Image (cartoon, rainbow, N blue to C red):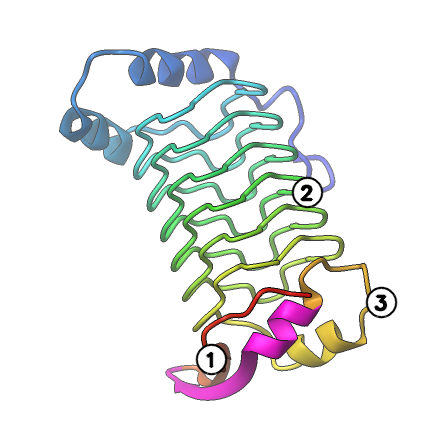
Amino acid sequence: LEGGILSKGELSVERGQVLISLVNSNLDTNSLKAIYEKGNFRYSDLVGVNFRKAYLRNVSLSYASLAQAFFPEANLGQADLTKSQLTQADFSQANLSQADLSESDLTKALLRDARLTGANLQEADLRQANLQNADLSFANLTNAKLSGANLLGAKLDQAIVHASWMGVLAKTSGDSIIGKTYVLENYRLDSVSTDAGVGYRLRLRRAPSAEI
């Protein structure tokens, strides 16, 4: 790593090509899952690749370069995308439930209608990301960067956040986070006991209403 950013020398085009071949093969999902669980596709160079509707459950893609890649309706449940480069990637309607996206770069990513239930987004960069109508229930958003993000219609019930999250959101300028009013009106911060002490989750006040 060079200053926390992937260097070209570490990225592997060949490893990425192996994954592309697997996705495009006629292997059934059980066979692919077994390969992904044992295989390692970390540091793959997959910039701009098209993985629409691909089966990638449990795949290991930490530190991979996936900028501007396409994942609409793909299954990435429980995938490891830690510290991956995902700028402007398209995850619309993708399944990212319980995926690890901690410290990943998702700036300007399209996550509209994506399923992110239980996903780990700790310290992820979600600036200017489109999370409209995404399901972030039980997701960990601790220290995630959300400036300029679109949270309109997002499901945030039981999402884990920092203690000051709602206060910081309330103080942001009107258009710095799209859906700010929607979140403040429909969710509240609640403290919960955890093994590590006191934690904080967002709780639904009532059935979400559309922002006016």
Q: Quadrant of residue 139?
A: bottom left
Q: Quadrant of the C terminus?
A: bottom right
**Does dot 2 land on a helix, a strand or a loop?**
loop
Can residue 191 be found in the magenta stretch? Answer: yes
Q: Amino acid at mark 2?
A: Thr
State how far apart marks 2 and 1 are (Cα). 30 Å
Q: Which residue is mark 3?
A: 173
Callouts 3 and 1 close, C-beta under 8 Å: no
Q: Amino acid at mark 1?
A: Arg
Q: Is residue 126 above or below residue 92?
A: below
Residue 42 x/y as whole percent: 45, 30
Categorize mark 2 by other alpha carbons within 10 Å: few (<14), some (14-19), many (20+): many
State how far apart marks 3 and 1 are (Cα). 25 Å
Categorize mark 1 by other alpha carbons within 10 Å: few (<14), some (14-19), many (20+): few
Residue at point 39% right, 60% down? 118
Q: Which residue is mark 1?
A: 206
